[in-house]
Image: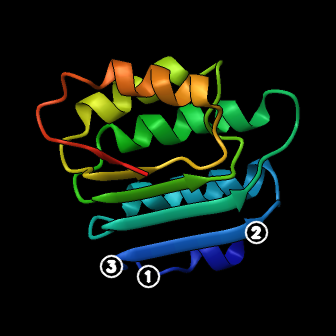
Amino acid sequence: IELVAHLPPTIEKLTVKNAEFGREFIGAVIDRVKEFHNLKFLMLDKALVGGIDGGQEAGVRLAEVLVRHTSIETLYLDDTDLIGTDNVEQWGDTLLQNKTLTYFSSDGVTEEVVEQLKEKTKDRVSELEWC
């Protein structure tokens, strides 16, 4: 958590892998993402919150931050518990409203959730590439 708090606010790329450190860690990452005004690339790969609903609750927080973020172009949320059936609507809204995001990867998310996200964003003004 201290490491995340000391990341420079001017970074353009942030990759977090194999981070099963829980809600407090993911919360610190989300708080810092709000402050990264030059961030173009965000990857959370195997970053797990844990708990019954903890991941999806943290995912809602991240979605709320990203809906207003104006520099992230590439977002990887692979093998995380941040997206699921309980927050697919919030993520769909975020992907629909965020105009700077051009690439989105969600490996490990169920096909049902991915299809719901694609349906929600089908009328998006700028094209979103899915992986």
Q: Which mark is residue 18?
A: 2
As drawn, is 119 to the left or to the right of 112? left
Q: Position of residue 28 (x, y in %)?
A: 63, 58
Residue at 87% in and 28% down: 52
Q: Residue furthest left?
A: 125
Q: Position of residue 33 (x, y in %)?
A: 45, 59
**27 lies above or below 115:** below
Q: Which residue is mark 3?
A: 10
Q: Position of residue 3 (x, y in %)?
A: 66, 79
What's the amino acid at mark 2? Answer: Asn
The disc, 1 or 2, on the residue closer to the chain's N-terminal end is: 1
Residue at 33% in and 79% down: 10
Q: In terms of depth relative to the viewer, which is nearer, 44 or 57?
A: 44
Name the front one of labels 3 and 2.
2
Q: Which residue is mark 1?
A: 8
Query: What's the distance in space between the residues labelled 1 and 2, CA to CA?
Result: 22 Å
Q: Position of residue 111 (x, y in %)?
A: 59, 30
Q: Is residue 64 visible in the rendered structure shown here?
A: yes
Which image quadrant is residue 120 in?
top left
What's the amino acid at mark 3? Answer: Thr
Describe the element under mark 3 as helix, strand or loop.
loop
Please say if the residues under marks 1 and 2 sit with CB atoms less than 8 Å apart. no
Residue at 37% in and 79% down: 11
Query: What's the distance in space between the residues labelled 3 and 2, CA to CA?
Result: 24 Å
The disc, 3 or 2, on the residue closer to the chain's N-terminal end is: 3
